[in-house]
Image (cartoon, grey):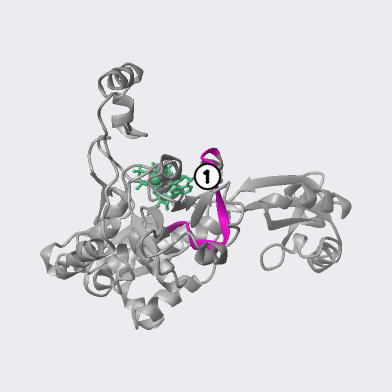
């Protein structure tokens, strides 16, 4: 007898201990199966149907962004937008539509991660933040989906094959492939939530005898239950695998993933304002992520000229005391004793951006060259030149960076009403 219960979310909480006991009592002769078995073909049909019904840009005038409504990515996405001063304003927690007051004209829609991708494909949203794994699985290499930023710095995990730890002879994918246990009559049974990626991977690796099945979560339980031989699922810390007596194998890493910013090519090229919004988001995200790893340090250093101080810094601290492009060195003006006049004195103020991880080393180096009054500040943004990801996007869209000059954000929004 097998009884499957929800592992998490509202349903799991509802099935509290009391209810679990009741179920145990009444279910002596009951078998509940939660897993669905889908063929790859049916999933493909489902995903491509969305493609056929892609909406035209004229069907609405607003720019829509989709972000995960729950799960691991939801909180991190909100935090990233907040850190970039793109805070999402939600009137109440059960509402699925919101706005970003700093970017007027953008509607934010909260959706399940899978639906963010589906709605990008169908043209119901223009911009989205999701895990790269979802983008690849659901988007299935749809040419309309353009990755604008591929490393948002959260949701880091990888999709991997895991087999029972007690399969001592199976260390690598090659071992799994040559295992004589699998045949046409008794294929290798793999359970996964990533049917498209799994189909592609096993075909590319030359597996002839594989049967895929799918479930929505807690896949790690399937081998012990006898429902599958191995799994293809996300791994981050590896704890879930370990706790379920599973192990990864060499060559079984299918895809590396983290949060990505995606946009619809159709919307970028045709919906007024979308390209400008993406430009601003990209600039803010890049500048924030660059700043996140740095501290701004200022200190006073004795010297006879700014050049001498800069030379002392670079010859003693090497790259560390040179900052991002070289130290900023400015004279400190000292006043005469009666305060009536000021003159360039023998102290200079230096400002440098340094990696957070090397802050103490920096302080010690500054002291060594006579630095005093060392102040350390967090940074909000480091805006550099136009981000390389922007040029890459323009390239991808077949546009010239100069073409965008006239699409400045103000003009774009001003044009919206007339479009
Ligand atoms: N263990 C993990 N560590 C880091 N990122 C993860 C992990 N598991 C999933 N993710 C990322 O988060 C995204 C959303 O996963 P999450 O589990 O929150 O949602 P879901 O599986 O769609 O929903 P649910 O599990 O609640 O049914 C995944 O697509 C992946 O990019
Ligand atoms: O390597 P770890 O750090 O242990 O993380 C991996 C687990 O995280 C995800 O599951 P999630 O918690 O989203 O539950 P789910 O299986 O119900 O989606 C994923 O599906 C793995 O089960
Ligand atoms: Mg999950």
Look at 28% across and 63% down and name the residue there: 40
Residue 169 belongs to magenta span: no
Q: Which residues are magenta?
A: 243-260
- Quarter of the image with the N terminus in it: top left
Comparing 99 with 199, the one in front is: 199
Percent across and percent down for residue 351 are: 70, 56
Can the viewer see residue 158 in this picture?
no
Percent across and percent down for residue 52 are: 16, 70
Look at 35% across and 77% down and name the residue there: 404
Left or right of 378, for residue 190? left
Can the viewer see residue 216 in this picture?
yes
Secondary structure state at the residue bearing disc 1: helix
Residue 242 is drawn in which quadrant? top right
Look at 30% across and 24% down and name the residue there: 15
Which corner quadrant of the figure contains ligand 2?
Answer: top left
Residue 14 versus residue 229 in the image, above or below: above
**Mark 1 — residue?**
241
């Amino acid at each position: 007898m097998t009884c499957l219960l929800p592992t998490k979310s509202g349903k799991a909480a509802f099935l509290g201990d009391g209810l679990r006991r009741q179920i145990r009592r009444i279910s002596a002769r009951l078998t509940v199966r939660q897993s669905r078995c889908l063929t790859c073909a049916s999933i493909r049909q489902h995903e491509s149907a969305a493609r056929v019904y892609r909406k035209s840009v004229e069907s609405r005038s607003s720019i829509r962004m989709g972000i995960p409504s729950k799960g691991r990515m939801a909180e991190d996405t909100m935090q990233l937008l907040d850190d970039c001063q793109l805070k999402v304003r939600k009137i109440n927690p059960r509402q699925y539509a919101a706005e970003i007051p700093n970017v007027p004209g953008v509607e934010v829609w909260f959706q399940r991660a899978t639906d963010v991708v589906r709605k990008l494909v169908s043209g119901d949203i223009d911009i989205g933040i999701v895990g790269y794994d979802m983008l690849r699985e659901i988007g299935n290499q749809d040419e309309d989906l353009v990755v604008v930023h591929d490393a948002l710095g959260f949701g880091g995990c990888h999709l991997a094959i895991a087999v029972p730890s007690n399969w001592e002879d199976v260390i690598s994918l090659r071992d799994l492939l040559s295992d004589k246990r699998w045949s046409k009559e008794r294929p290798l049974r793999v359970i996964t939530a990533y049917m498209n990626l799994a189909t592609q991977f096993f075909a590319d690796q030359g597996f002839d005898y594989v049967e895929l099945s799918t479930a929505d979560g807690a896949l790690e339980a399937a081998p012990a239950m006898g429902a599958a031989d191995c799994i293809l699922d996300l791994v981050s810390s590896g704890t879930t695998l370990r706790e379920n007596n599973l192990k990864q194998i060499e060559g079984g890493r299918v895809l590396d993933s983290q949060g990505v910013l995606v946009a619809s090519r159709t919307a970028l090229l045709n919906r007024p304002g979308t390209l400008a919004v993406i430009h601003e988001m990209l600039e803010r995200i890049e500048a924030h992520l660059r700043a996140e790893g740095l501290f701004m340090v200022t200190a006073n250093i004795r010297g006879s000229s700014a050049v001498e101080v800069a030379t002392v810094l670079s010859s003693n601290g090497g790259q560390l005391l040179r900052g991002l492009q070289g130290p900023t060195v400015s004279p400190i003006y000292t006043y005469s004793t009666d305060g009536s006049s000021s003159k360039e004195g023998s102290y200079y103020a230096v400002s440098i951006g340094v990696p957070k991880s090397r802050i103490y080393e920096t302080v010690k180096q500054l002291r060594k060259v006579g630095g005093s009054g060392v102040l350390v500040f967090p940074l909000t943004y480091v805006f550099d030149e136009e981000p390389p990801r922007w040029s890459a996007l323009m390239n991808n869209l077949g546009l010239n960076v100069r073409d965008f000059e006239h699409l400045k954000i103000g003009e774009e929004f001003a044009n919206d009403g007339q479009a």
